Image (tube, rainbow, N blue to C red):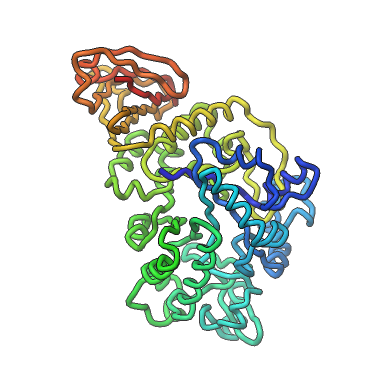
């Protein structure tokens, strides 16, 4: 099972430079830092934002009062020097020289590989920077407008070298003024996308595709209509991904995906897609809602990315207090599919810095939370092996709090694991019939991998009526059963 650790490359290298009193690039990260990252239970690192950023995009951002307000909110002592271009306003898919350039990235990848860790990098398929070479070299790969368009809505269009280009957007929000929209229906764009991804595949083991659903034929047609031209017979990703895999057959494709299009994107070739539905249900809905989500087809679930935060979402410590964060973290760490962790999450950071910033505010480390995550990441790696099954909890006529319990098992030829989460603000009791028929006739010990607490139970009762579980609000068990 894949466990991804996202790092904001710019901020991270800046803090390492301060920590070591010298400039640290990707090729010069000290060995002990590599060991900290490649902890047991983490097998993939996502270095977010390594590509060359756009000076023109930065110029536009510095004149956007709405953006500047978000910068000041995250960093009250903000100065202009703290602001850089967005990592999703890419001028060129070349590693920024301030990070050590391609050579530095190659060294970082090699160091991760010695620790058994893969490297993931970004790809932004929907748009490019306003100073990207394609505006002059491949204008047919971009959505174009007219002088009338520019005069009518100047915020939605950009003029370059006598041509008018549309600013990038998704169908539900105003255009992003610092980027230019590609044309997903253009043969030239599709060929360029393949070339770009092949190049990324030479530098990394996987690629995280930003807002991947925007390039799907039906979504793109609804967003751009006649401006995009004729709808191709073949969808964008089924065209692109197989051609990239001819060169890089093992390249991991991860889609940032929303709008319940995860299954469709899996069918179009992605290995994993963001599970935003689970995120929303863990944060805002009850156990019945979460359980219904986990009842989906297992092959679909294996292709999801479970997370509680990333650079687009609020810090989980700021929105889920105390034990509630821990309960949600146990869930995402022990479910099938990939898991995404965000640098700073383990330490309890509460401020999410906008990706335009070169630094973030200092925050105290929550040592108890860090210790919890250390145990959880290791436990998750031990648990997520073999066959997964969602379990049914039962209760009593006068006590229906079992409905607040979520339970699932993992089974291999040699191991048995059980996870139970009380997804509620009150105590919950119930019985969990275990799926292992051979347990009868003898006693068994269950050890909680998070607390090391042990429970000796009769094997027949574990099967029927099931393991009795009583958990306080937002508490959990991650249990290993000894034969």
Residue 13 spot, x, y in % from top left: 70, 49
Question: As drawn, is 383 to the left or to the right of 92?
Answer: left
Query: Looking at the image, which is closer to me, 332 or 276?
Result: 332
Rendered-image quadrant of the C terminus: top left
Residue 2 spot, x, y in % from top left: 44, 45
Query: Looking at the image, which is closer to me, 112 or 401?
Result: 112
Rendered-image quadrant of the N terminus: top left
Query: Looking at the image, which is closer to me, 113 or 380?
Result: 113
Residue 470 spot, x, y in % from top left: 36, 17
Q: Up-down: is 45 above or below 141? A: above
Residue 287 spot, x, y in % from top left: 35, 33
Question: As drawn, is 400 to the left or to the right of 345?
Answer: left
Q: How many marks?
A: 0
Question: As drawn, is 10 to the left or to the right of 109?
Answer: right
Query: Looking at the image, which is closer to me, 244 or 321?
Result: 244
Q: Residue at x 47, y 77 (%)?
A: 191
Quarter residue 473 falls in: top left
Q: Residue at x 47, y 56 (%)?
A: 256
Q: Residue at x 58, y 52 (%)?
A: 110
Is residue 410 in sight in this rendering?
yes
């Amino acid at each position: 099972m894949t466990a991804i650790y996202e790092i904001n490359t710019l901020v991270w290298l800046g803090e390492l430079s301060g920590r070591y009193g010298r400039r640290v690039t990707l090729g010069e990260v000290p060995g002990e830092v590599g060991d900290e990252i490649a902890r047991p239970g983490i097998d993939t690192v996502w270095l977010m934002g390594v590509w060359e950023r756009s000076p023109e995009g930065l110029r536009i951002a510095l004149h956007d009062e709405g953006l500047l307000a978000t910068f000041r909110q995250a960093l009250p002592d903000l100065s202009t020097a703290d602001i850089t271009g967005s990592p999703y306003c890419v001028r060129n898919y070349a590693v920024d020289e301030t990070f050590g350039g391609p050579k530095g990235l190659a060294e970082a990848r090699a160091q991760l590989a010695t620790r058994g860790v893969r490297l993931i990098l970004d790809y932004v398929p929907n748009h490019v920077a306003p100073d990207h070479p394609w505006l002059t070299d491949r204008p047919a790969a971009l959505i174009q407008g007219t002088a009338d368009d520019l005069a009518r809505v100047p915020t939605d269009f950009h003029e370059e070298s006598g041509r008018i280009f549309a600013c990038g957007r998704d169908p539900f929000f105003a255009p992003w003024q610092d980027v230019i929209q590609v044309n997903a229906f253009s043969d030239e764009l599709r060929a360029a996308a393949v070339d770009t991804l092949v190049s990324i595949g030479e530098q990394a083991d996987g690629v995280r595709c930003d807002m991947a659903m925007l390039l799907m034929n039906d979504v793109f047609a609804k967003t751009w209509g006649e401006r995009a031209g004729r709808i191709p017979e073949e969808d964008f990703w089924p065209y692109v991904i197989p051609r990239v895999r001819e060169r890089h057959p093992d390249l991991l494709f991860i889609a940032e995906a929303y709008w319940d299009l995860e299954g469709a994107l899996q069918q179009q070739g992605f290995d994993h897609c963001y599970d935003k539905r689970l995120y929303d249900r863990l944060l805002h809905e009850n156990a019945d809602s979460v359980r219904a989500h986990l009842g989906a087809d297992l092959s679909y679930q294996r292709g999801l990315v479970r997370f509680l935060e990333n650079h687009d979402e609020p810090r989980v410590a700021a929105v889920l207090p105390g034990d509630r964060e821990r309960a949600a973290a146990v869930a995402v760490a022990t479910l099938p599919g990939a898991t995404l962790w965000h640098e700073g999450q383990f330490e309890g950071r509460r401020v999410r810095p906008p990706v335009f910033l070169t630094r973030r505010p200092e925050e105290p480390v929550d040592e108890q939370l860090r210790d919890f995550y250390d145990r959880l990441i290791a436990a998750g790696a031990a648990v997520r092996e073999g066959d997964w099954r969602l379990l049914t909890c039962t209760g009593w006529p006068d006590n229906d709090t079992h409905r607040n319990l979520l339970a699932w098992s993992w089974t291999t030829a040699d191991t048995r694991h059980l996870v139970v989460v009380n997804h509620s603000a009150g105590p919950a009791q119930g019985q969990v019939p275990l799926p292992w028929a051979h347990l009868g006739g003898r006693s068994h010990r269950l050890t909680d991998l998070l607390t090391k607490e042990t429970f000796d139970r009769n094997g027949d009762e574990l099967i029927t009526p099931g393991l009795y579980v009583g958990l306080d609000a937002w508490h959990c068990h991650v249990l290993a059963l000894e034969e």
